[in-house]
Image (tube, rainbow, N blue to C red):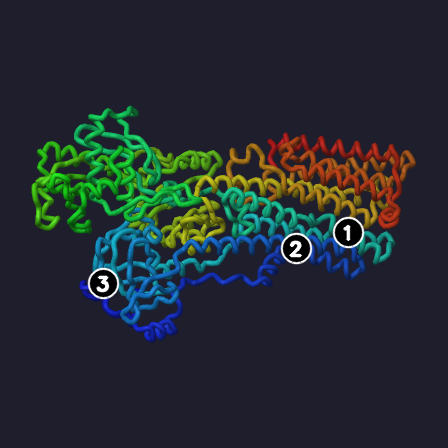
Amino acid sequence: MSSRTTDAPPAGSLAGPGPGLTQAEAGRRLARYGRNEVEPPRPTPLHRRVLAQLRDPLILVLLGAALLTIVIGDHPDAVVIGLVVVFNTTVGVAQEVRADHAVAALSALSAPHARVLRDGTPHEVSAAVVVPGDTLLLGEGDVVAADADLTDATALLVDESMLTGESEPVDKAANDTISAGTVIVRGRGAATATATGSASALGRIAALLDTGREPTPLQRRLASLGRVLAAVTLALCVLFFALGLVRGLSVSTMAVTAISLAVAAVPESLPAVVTLALALGARRMAARNALVRRLPAVETLGSVSVLATDKTGTLTEGRMVVQQLWVPSGVADVSGTGYEPTGDLTRAGNSLSPERLRPLQELLTTAALCNDASLRPPRQGADAWRAVGDPMEAALLAAAAKADCPDQAVLRQICPRFAEAPFDSLRKRMTTLHHLPDGNVLVCLKGAPEAVLMSTVLTEPPELLDRARRQAALLAARGFRVLAVAGAERLVWDLPADQAEHGLNLLGLVAISDPPKAAAATTLEACRAAGITPVLITGDHPATAHAIAVRTGLVEDGPAGEVMTGPELAAAPDTDLTGVRVFARTDPQQKLDIVRAWRARGAVTAMTGDGVNDGPALRQADIGVAMGARGTEVARQAADLVLTDDELSTVVTAVEEGRRVYDNIRRFLVYAMAGGTAEILVMLAGPLLGLPLPLRAGQILWINLLTHGLTGVAMGAEPVSPQAMHRPPRPPGQHILAAGVWQRLLVLAAAVTACSLAAGVVARAMDLPWQSVLFLALLAAQLGVALGLRARLCTTQNLFLPASVAASALLATAALYVPALQSLLDTEPVGRTGAGLALAAALAAFLAARLMRGAFHGKA
């Protein structure tokens, strides 16, 4: 279906743009079609953010427990539980709001203005008020504000990578179409706007983003756990309440005891631990150039098993660079990165003599004269040289500087240009004519090899032309963009420049590419070591995609048939997309299909991208990763993670952080649920050992507060395990208590129960205040487990944990000796012997936790 608007006038003539719309007509069309915006994101209301946080199953359990404590008049416990809920909700909402504000700041990077003709006069207006029928005036560096038909074009070159993924700019002529969001890199033109907003190509792609978000793996696992714990909690409440009534205890006493045990069974600080772990992870990632837009996405990164990456600017530098030169006398390699005019020309790793350098300088000097680009040095606060004009021509200027050719400004002064035949898609070559100091005319030509290496253009013998064609084909097969350069001197020339394109001398070939980043291969190797499968998805040429995939180690060297193209995919829709590692010439829908295929196979996918064409796949993936510096607004809004440095290695850092977060959550679950289970077992088994009422309700809640509160939350800040990035990702369907967690939980619960009951029984036999000894031993044993579960026992990276254990131990002691707490908790001093029994219980539990780590290979 066409996106053209019926009110748009037909394309104008080649004579140039007409007077454009009147201001009044533009206003009427703006009222009819709306602002030229693609589904601008609406801020989420605060109450919706809060409700989303409160829908967590564990939060719902806590809210239910708080309501029960209020009903029975236990207001202090209701306040404690309420504080946990408020803390969790506040941190989660604050993180989301902070991330949204940061992304909004990144949006200022996009160009918001356009030049249009109104009432026959050029005006600079906000791109949001461009309407169908407007005449757009386009120049170098402009971002096209709407889909349009070109009515006038002079040497127009357009970067369409943000829509198509194609890294090379596209030549445009009058009567061609041009899409919103593309960038003019060379030339000038005028165009009539045909579609704006959601009717534009950019808008149609953005419409694919409306797919909603699915819960993250952590959210699914915790929701499942929350449902189980809710059922267990209800059963415990009913069981203890019934047992108490059978034993003749009062309804109010058993209600308080039942609720206390229910609170003990539920690790009520789990939401706080999860939120703190995620928030700390988000903060660490922000410090390392990864901005998290949704807090649960931090953990999801740790589950990633497939990383689908684009090419331009992610695996590659995003800048064209001359990497090899060929002249009839041999081949030379060119070093250096980006557009910085520093580097060396070498042959087989050796520097070139002046004699061997001379033909290369002649080649590059001619390419620098037949050139409309320029280089700009780094601006204040930046460290990269910039290209103005065609990136390919800018790469030629940088290479000329590396070969010690005269500066472009000097060349233009010595050899001023007086005529030219611009590059176009039919001729595929560009020719310029220059006055030489001796009065002769210099002809400079560059273009596609098939348009230059012809006997009608060059005077070279057929053997040399065949040799040059073979070399050009070899370079193209390696993924290079190849240019042939020729030149000649004329005594005089007064004809058009294109008629000088014969009788020229071949100077050589230039191989240009967007080279891989220095860290790309290392990053992909780190992904594989962590069990993550990298997949390349690009809109670029298959040969280019294959070459980059080989050079970065994504695939082994082999035939280009390893690449699947978009047309091949369309022709064979039943192909197993998970068996391909390199995709080229893909459209937005096909990127979406690839991500869906991996997810249907059970993989947790991360997708990187920067263009509008990446937006739908970013939203569909489990983790969408957008580039912050060069990414489009559509990509940033679709993503869960925004990389402010545009480096793929930052994704690996984020994956490590996600694994750290998940390990800490599982470690806390082992600790908290083992402690809660032990408290229940103590209450059940105590009467069988002669301890009638092992613990009072207040004592249970005090233990729970000190173990699950400050100490439990501190476990969320534990440093990453040394083996975190040397093990495969978790299966997405794996339960959070799987992989040995529930076994360790039960063993540690049994150990804590045995140590605590043993201390209580011995204290009773020695006529000590056994209930207070049991209270202290149970609390101390759980603190011993907290220290024993550490991945790095003596690390100084999280001093908060040992400090919180010390604080909890101090508060436990205070409960025995501070009169107010003694009265509240019904405790009494235990003496040195009682304290020794509690310390022994703590040591035994600590050793049990260390043994459990060794038995399960140190897993969290």
On screen, 67 above or below 570? Answer: below
Closest to the camera, between mark 1 and mark 3, is 3
Does residue 161 appear anywhere in the picture? yes
Marks 3 and 2, the one that precedes in the sequence: 2
Does residue 4 appear anywhere in the picture? no
Label 1 neighbour load within 10 Å: few <14, some 14-19, many 20+: many
Q: Amino acid at mark 3?
A: Thr
Residue drawn at the location 25% of the way across and 41% of the way down: 408
Tell whether 646 sits left or right of 538.
right
Circle 3 is placed at which residue position? Answer: 151
Mark seen at residue 59? 2
Tell whether 84 sits left or right of 324.
right
Residues at circles 1 and 2 in contact by the CB criterion of under 8 Å: no
Tag 3 secondary structure: strand
Q: Gap in Å between the C-alphas at discs 1 and 2?
A: 17 Å
Tell whether 665 sits left or right of 266.
left
Circle 1 is placed at which residue position? Answer: 260
Mark seen at residue 796? none
Closest to the camera, between mark 1 and mark 2, is 2
Along the viewing direction, whichever of 514 and 75 lies nearer the viewer: 514
The quadrant of the rendering that contains the N terminus is: bottom left
Marks 1 and 3, the one that precedes in the sequence: 3
Tag 1 secondary structure: helix
